[in-house]
Image (cartoon, rainbow, N blue to C red):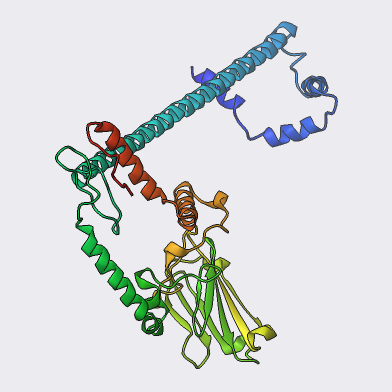
């Protein structure tokens, strides 16, 4: 056994590989030329062919070849086994990943189905509780109540009349107070929703204006004629922004609404067009780090934009993730429906819920009910 181990170690000894490789490269006619050179060396420099006899010399060569053949077979078997083990490992990993994916998808489907069922049940219960008369009227519509036989008496006085009168009075008062509200500023004039967006989905202030896309924000700051880059103080960090003239109060300074990719942010200064009154313009471009979202303001200390009035039509829907795209498409649909005086998606859903309720209760008379 010790002799066999010694032979195996000798066969795997790499110390003479470089020398033998250099010799092999000198033999351009293949293995036959290399063997002739080796056996010629044994013939000329040793007694391999003359001292031991032909049979013993042949046996030595054949034994060496047998050992090398056996070593080659072992190596091939080891490589095949390693390849098989790797393939098996990858197969098990794919099966595990597929199983985990299937379980995750099943869990998501189960949650969605449970939510849909809960929403449907809640909608049906709300419709049943709020509409013994099977009518979900709008805030400014009359509320009809069924008579004993299940029909609706449209001539009967309703509870909604006083509310309608109050709403009309409030509306008249709001119109009378409109000039005063306008003087209180753009944010107050737009109500709780914020400042209505201008073209470009931003707004203009006294000292700056800004626009945005889903991926970036562009801020424009007018500065006096003759202003140079070295006269400016512009600093943007992942979560803060400061823009202004050196030695003066900053036009914008504070925490950003959301993080930006600083490496992709830039600013420039150039002459303003004559139509804008001359001077120069500082343009700051901020790359949104997370994108696919509308900002209500650039820095959190500034007034908010009314995001419900942002116009998404110019956005490339193909760039959006599934959830954002669904939200944008819903906004676009609702905007078009309102422009045509038609119900929004939420109103259509309420109508569908009521229609299902009516089908489930054919014993009730809905013929004279006004359902909004």
Q: In which quarter of the image is residue 211?
A: bottom right
Residue 247 image offset from top left, x and y in percent: 50, 93
Q: Position of residue 87 (x, y in %)?
A: 51, 25
x 35%, y 80%: residue: 176
Residues 319 and 148: in front is: 148
> In the displayed image of the protein, which residue is found farthest to the left?
148
Looking at the picture, how far across and down is residue 61, in whole percent?
70, 14
Q: Farthest residue to the front: give it.
A: 155
Above/below status of 146 relative to 244: above
Residue 231 appears in view:
yes
- Find residue 197 and report its horizontal and vertical position in percent: 48, 70
Q: Nearer the viewer, residue 51 or 42?
A: 42
Horizontal arrangement in the rendering, residue 15 relative to residue 368 (left or right)? right
The residue sitting at 38% across, 79% down in the picture is 178
Residue 101 image-quadrant placement: top left
Farthest residue, direction top: 55
The structure residue drawn at horizontal position 53% and vertical position 78%, both measured from the top left corner, is 209
Residue that protrudes farthest toward the right in the picture: 29
Viewer-proximal residue among 47 and 27: 27
> Relative to 227, is 327 on the left or the right?
left
């Amino acid at each position: 056994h010790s002799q066999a181990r010694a032979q195996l170690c000798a066969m795997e000894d790499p110390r003479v590989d470089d020398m033998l490789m250099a010799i092999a490269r000198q033999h351009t006619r293949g293995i036959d030329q290399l063997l002739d050179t080796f056996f010629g060396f044994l013939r000329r420099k040793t007694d391999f062919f003359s001292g031991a006899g032909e049979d013993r010399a042949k046996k030595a060569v054949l034994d060496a070849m047998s050992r090398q053949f056996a070593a080659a077979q072992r190596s091939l078997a080891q490589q095949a086994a390693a390849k098989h083990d790797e393939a098996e490992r990858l197969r098990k990993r794919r099966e595990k990943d597929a199983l985990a994916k299937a379980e995750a998808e099943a869990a998501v489907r189960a949650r969605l189905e449970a939510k849909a069922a809960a929403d449907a049940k809640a909608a049906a219960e709300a419709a049943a509780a709020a509409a013994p008369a099977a009518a979900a009227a709008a805030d400014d519509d009359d509320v009809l109540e069924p008579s004993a036989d299940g029909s609706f008496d449209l001539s009967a006085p309703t509870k909604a009349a006083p509310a309608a009168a109050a709403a009309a009075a409030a509306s008249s008062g709001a119109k009378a107070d409109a000039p005063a509200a306008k003087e209180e500023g753009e944010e107050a004039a737009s109500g709780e929703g914020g400042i209505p967006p201008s073209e470009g989905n931003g707004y203009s202030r006294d000292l700056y204006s800004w626009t945005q896309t889903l991926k970036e924000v562009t801020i424009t700051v007018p500065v006096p004629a003759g202003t140079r880059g070295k006269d400016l103080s512009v600093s943007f960090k992942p979560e803060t922004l400061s823009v202004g003239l050196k030695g003066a109060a900053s036009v914008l300074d504070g925490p950003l609404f959301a993080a930006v990719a600083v490496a992709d942010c830039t600013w420039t200064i150039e002459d303003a067009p004559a139509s804008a009154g001359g001077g120069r313009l500082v343009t700051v471009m901020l790359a949104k780090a997370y994108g696919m979202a509308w900002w209500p303001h650039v820095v959190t200390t500034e007034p908010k934009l009314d995001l419900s009035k942002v116009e998404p039509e110019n956005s490339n829907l193909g760039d959006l993730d599934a959830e954002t795209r669904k939200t944008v498409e819903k906004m676009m649909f609702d905007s078009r429906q309102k422009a045509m005086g038609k119900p929004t998606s939420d109103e259509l859903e309420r109508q569908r819920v009521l229609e299902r309720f009516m089908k489930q209760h054919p014993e009730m008379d809905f013929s004279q009910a006004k359902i909004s």
